[in-house]
Amino acid sequence: MSDSLMSMLFLTFVFPLAGFVLLAFSRGRFSENMSALIGVGSMGLSAATTALVMREFLANPPADGVYTQVLWTWLRIENFSPRFALHLDGLSLTMLGIVTGVGFLIHLFASWYMRGEEGYSRFFAYMNLFVASMLYLVLADNLLFLYCGWEGVGLCSYLLIGFYYKHSANGHAAMKAFIITRVGDVFMAVGLFILFRELGTLDIRNILQAVPSHANHDALALAALLLLGGAVGKSAQLPLQTWLADAMAGPTPVSALIHAATMVTAGVYLVARMHTLFEVSPGVLYLVGVVGAITLLMAGFSALVQTDIKRVLAYSTMSQIGYMFLALGVGAWQAAIFHLMTHAFFKALLFLSAGAVIIACHHEQDIFKMGGLWKKIPFIYLCFIVGGSALAAFPFVTAGFYSKDEILWLAYAGGNASLFYAGLFGALLTSLYTFRLIFLVFHGEAKTDAHAGHGVSYGLPLAVLLVLSTAVGAMIHPPLAGVLPESPASHLEEGKHTLEMLSAGVAIFGIVVAAILFLPANKPLQGFFSTRFAHGFRCLWKYAWGFDALYNVLFVKPYLYLVHINRRDLIDVVIESIPGVMRAGHDALSATENGRVRWYAAAMVSGAAAVLVVVLWF
Amino acid sequence: MILPLLIFIPLLGGLLCWQVERMSRAAPRWIALLSMLLVTALGVQLVLQGDYSLATATGGGAHWQSEYRLHWIPALGISFHLGIDGLSLLMVLLTGGLGVAAILCSWREIQKNVGFFYLNLLWNLGGVIGVFLALDMFLFFFFWEVMLVPMYFLIALWGHNAPDGKGRIHAANKFFIFTQASGLLLLIAIVALVLIAAHQNGVISFDYDVLRHTRMSPNVEYLVMLGFFIAFAVKMPVLPFHSWLPDAHAQAPTAGSVDLAGILLKTAAYGLLRFALPIFPHASQEFAPVAMWLGVTGIFYGAVLACAQTDIKRLVAYTSISHMGFVLVGIYSGNMIALQGVVIQMLAHGISAGGLFILCGEIYERLHTRDLRQMGGLWSRMTWLPAFALFFAAASLGLPGTGNFVGEFLILLGAFKVVPVVATVATGALILAAVYSLLLVQKAFFGPSRSEEALEGLNLRERGIMLVLVVSLLVLGVYPQPVLDLSEAIMFYTQHWYAVPVLK
């Protein structure tokens, strides 16, 4: 193999980092074209480098399937010496391809989408920084370095959610996202501490090698549980899922890149990366699946009743990541990553198309104020049909079908019946809410005028993602063999065909139901929807099962109360009262020195009497 | 010969500043700047010429890279004894660097009695350097007091009167009384220690290397240790002795705040590492749980109070209390990784808090208020400053890539090996760090702006200071090894003395 080609690996994140530095120091003095050139160009270079590295890696795979590039030793204290080293294997290669490839397309689209907005270069600076951090995350060879990327993407996510900073609401959404994911990060950090204490290293390969023979299984299970805590924070799974819907306050390309295609799947990547650790803790691994199953159902219900086009997609993202967690939980590691990849394609397509719709409708996001758009923006309609079908796992022609079917099959074959049924029911919900969205936005009577976008930076990313969302995308097989274990059920064949038919049937059934419910001008079941019973559920789902309110009561309010009662710093109040006490004592004593002879005489007599009493008494 | 120069350059420079003011107003600034640059350069020279690695340090005893000794009061065994090792050198470098920043940031702020201002600032810095170098306990105490008085004047004469605060004189008095009372305790403890040692050795001596081998009965050791601890705890500050800090910060001029948060607080941590742990290993071991829980309490208390502040400088002051709590936990955990983390955390916090205070000062110069409720939307109104503030806020919440992350992570990683519960609870505070840091950014820079009028951006001088601080913080974050190498030997011995208290 040619080392010189592989050693270009570090350039994949150097380009976006350089782009960030250039744009950050431009202080907005660059023209929009110049900023776009730097922002998108650096991503293009990064993607091109990835392509070269990928070709080399696949053509001449390194000896043990891993290429390591050591940049420098970060620090060295006794025998703790984490390195800045890049670790390229089938898994990180897949992630690398997704991040740079999809990232490049979204950057390109954003150069169209963000035209004329204030802070154009600031936007690309943050986006480039995000990509660089995401690349540390997926390429890191030790958990400390991974944690760096992990926090870095969190910061970029914060900055981009709050990109339109003049509205306080956006700032609050951004803070919420950062703080809730930070809660997960704290779990993860403690998990790292435990791993280091038990195994004496944070190097991922060493950990994975040492784990099976390590005696203290309880500690490892606890570490796995804590890492899961980090993963659910980043990936918006129960119980740390509440930030994702609010994160839609950011510009739509941000939602596409960070809150759909890449960052939110970091939790899936982490669990897959540490798979051996989870395998020796079967209880925690099962919990991963349960968390995924519950989240996918809850988010599916929530997506059904949203009115904001981006929030529908946000809940669907949560739900799809739930599928990935479910897959991890049943040991279908490869299927999880496969779904991660196809999801990146079709969800990026859907978000970018949603962005196009929003621009076409003059920044309208309420789907009930749209309608009949298919005639005006037919290309976007096509994108939505293809992306939506992939999301709903429309059989045989979409990428999503193959990946989701794989997950359902492995869950079923692995004997996890309850997880399987949850997944199957979730599939029904998925096709329902997806086509509800499509029918409401593109069919029915037109409520707003719309104008189509044009240009290469607008059309090209959509077209490429459109193709990747079809069965073509499913033909890309991530090179995961040897990196992630085969699912225990993967050799089974019996019943696979039946299940394929079943899940295809469910998807189509969902679409048909959606068509009946939402396509006709005179929508059926309106009477039922307006009953108090239905309304109650709608509210519950719309506000995502009330988690925000719950956390508000449990955490935010008590904390604010604590902040409030101690606003003046009680310890300081006590200390500041010392001078007052002294002064009071001074006043009391100086009141006795008043220059009146009678007073003194009385004081002397009573003093003498007191002394006499004391002496006589004792 | 470099060691006394490190102290006398600022002291003489200060006198010079004071006198040349009658010639020109600008002259004191340049003299002050030159003195501190010279100090920094000498520090760098010491780094280059010395060998601080663990391998070359001779086993057992403290290994001073360079020493300077002059008889002072021979009858009492007091000498002018200075010595430097990796730890004190790093602290001297921090003092030099932040001293330069403090001088530069008051370039325009201070217009009144410029010469006397720089006299106080330089004497304070000289006193701090003396504290870091002194190896004679009497000399140490002398410098401990030298750094106190000029700071009092800095706050009292050039301070601000915050509208809702009690005024600069009040703050200066409070600062003085707190530190003076604790200094008295320190003096008593030093004298007690010296007398015990004199009784044992038959010779009276204030020398550190002699006193370090003093044998004490457990109770006596505990008592004397407490004297040292409380004195340092007030300076650090540790709960419940912290309350002078927010007041002093709120009213102090920018340079005073930089000096306080960046450098003065570090003398306390230095004192614990240099004196409390090595001289009283048994008592410190016994006291460690208390100290660590005090640290954890401080971390949370500071963080919660930071969220409640409306004065931006008070907010940053409370975050200092929170960050120094990590230092306390790290020191008393006695783990090598944690101790090395303490070194990084001290430097990183010095730089990041210094940076934030300078930015607060610059905001005040432009907006004439430090009230967060009067700010909002500043992002669009000025160039550079908000971006720098964002960086330092990110550093303050421990973002990887900055030295603060390395420091906090190492402290927690090391402490977890020794005291998992303490470390786990302390880790939880990282959430609160995110809350207060983001609140600061949100309230000051984001949200709707109160006016559209553009404010003056940062000029070249201001940008220069910031850029240097940012770069140093990033270097600490991605390649802290040179710093760790400097402190490796002394931290190794500190850990050794503390962890295995030999029967003396």
Image (tube, coloured by chain):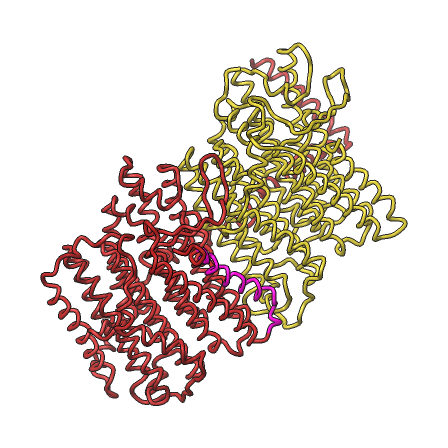
Chain colours: A red, B yellow
- Residue extending farthest to the top is B202
A394 magenta-colored:
no
Relative to B39, say whether A46 is above or below.
below
- Where in the figure is residue B176, as x and y percent of width and height? 69, 38
Numbered-mark total: 0
Q: Does residue A239 appear in this view? A: yes
Q: Quadrant of residue A194?
A: top left
- Where in the figure is residue B427, as x and y percent of width and height? 44, 44
Magenta residues (range): A7-30
* Residue shown at the point (74%, 45%) measured from the top left: B37
Residue nearest the viewer, comparing A524 with A190: A190
- Residue extending farthest to the right is B23
A27 magenta-colored:
yes
Relative to A54, say whether A616 is above or below.
above
Task: Determine the main secondary structure of the stretch shown in magenta.
Answer: helix
- Where in the figure is residue A406, as x and y percent of width and height? 20, 63
* Residue shown at the point (87%, 44%) measured from the top left: B19
- Where in the figure is residue A23, as x and y percent of width and height? 57, 66
- Residue extending farthest to the left is A494
* Residue shown at the point (21%, 83%) measured from the top left: A524
Residue nearest the viewer, comparing A186 with A242: A186
Q: Is residue B209 left or right of residue A548?
A: right
Residue nearest the viewer, comparing A480 with A214: A480
Query: Is the N terminus of chain B in the top left, top right, bottom left or bottom right quadrant?
Result: top right
Q: Does residue A228 appear in this view? A: no
Q: Is residue A34 left or right of residue A143?
A: right
